[in-house]
């Protein structure tokens, strides 16, 4: 892989290098072409991407939602996060600035009380500290009271602290409320810009 940072970096590319991980992730991001019905939403997302640093520093939130699957919600979320990393990497060192959380997997691991995975525990420790968190597939599975308490704790505290979040999901407000309860659904919906995609599955 040709890393764009090679000219200014003497380190060997490896899975422990943050820049390398970012570049590898970039290579896996597809080019999105909007259906006509999504053109204006894509323009809005492109505007956010062009000034993503201000979006994150302002503690703004975004909910990317679509009743259809495979039309770009997660890809857009990753593109926005990578653009933010691109803006802040210089002089960043090893500081963690953002996290991608696949919500069903995260909640499953939270319920494994014997889990001694240091990476997962580090991730949980960073959840309230990092600038930006992508919460992917929120509300996509049935949730216990424990699941809801975990999500509410992290998301509520992040929003109260002015930390930026990007949510992706398939549920509009009434169904989101049924899945997450009124308090958490209201937190997500009412503090976020809503970007609804209506295009067909592109996978």
Image (cartoon, grey):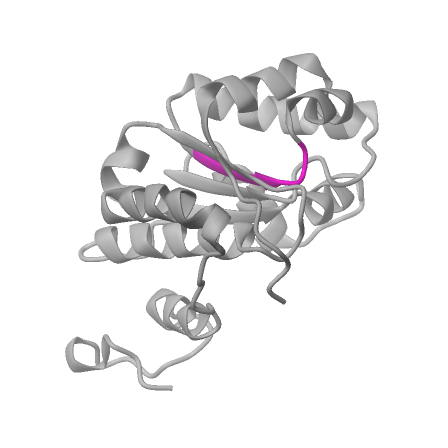
Residue 193 in the figure: left or right of residue 203: left
Residue at figure coordinates x 81%, y 31% from the top left? 143
Would you identify the image quadrant in which residue 86 lies?
bottom left
* Picture layout, residue 76 above or below residue 113: below
Which residues fall within the magenta stretch?
165-171
Residue 195 is situated, as x and y percent measured from the top left of the image, at 47, 36
Residue at figure coordinates x 19%, y 57% from the top left? 90
Residue that extends furthest to the front in the rendered view of this protein: 36
Task: Name the magenta segment's main secondary structure.
Answer: strand
Which image quarter holds the N terminus? bottom left
Would you identify the image quadrant in which residue 3 lies?
bottom left
Count numbered badges in the picture.
Answer: 0
* Picture layout, residue 112 above or below residue 58: below
Residue at figure coordinates x 43%, y 74% from the top left? 24
The foreground one among 183 and 177 is: 177
Residue 102 in the figure: left or right of residue 79: right
């Amino acid at each position: 892989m040709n890393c764009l940072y090679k000219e200014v970096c003497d380190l060997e590319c490896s899975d422990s290098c943050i820049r390398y991980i970012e570049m590898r992730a970039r290579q896996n991001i597809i080019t999105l072409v909007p259906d006509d019905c999504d053109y204006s939403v894509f323009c809005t997302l492109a505007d956010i991407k062009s000034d993503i640093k201000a979006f994150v520093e302002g503690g703004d939130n975004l909910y990317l939602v679509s009743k259809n699957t495979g039309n770009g919600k997660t890809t857009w979320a990753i593109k926005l996060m990578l653009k933010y990393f691109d803006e802040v990497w210089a002089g960043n060192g090893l500081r963690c600035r953002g996290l991608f959380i696949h919500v069903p997997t995260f909640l499953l691991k939270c319920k494994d009380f014997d889990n001694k995975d240091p990476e997962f525990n580090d991730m949980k420790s960073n959840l309230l500290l990092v600038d930006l968190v992508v919460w992917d597939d929120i509300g996509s599975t049935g949730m216990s009271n424990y699941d809801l308490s975990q999500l509410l704790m992290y998301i509520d505290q992040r929003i109260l602290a002015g930390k930026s979040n990007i949510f992706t999901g398939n549920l509009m407000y009434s169904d989101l409320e049924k899945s997450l309860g009124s308090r958490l659904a209201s937190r997500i919906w009412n503090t976020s810009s809503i970007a609804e995609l209506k295009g067909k599955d592109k996978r």
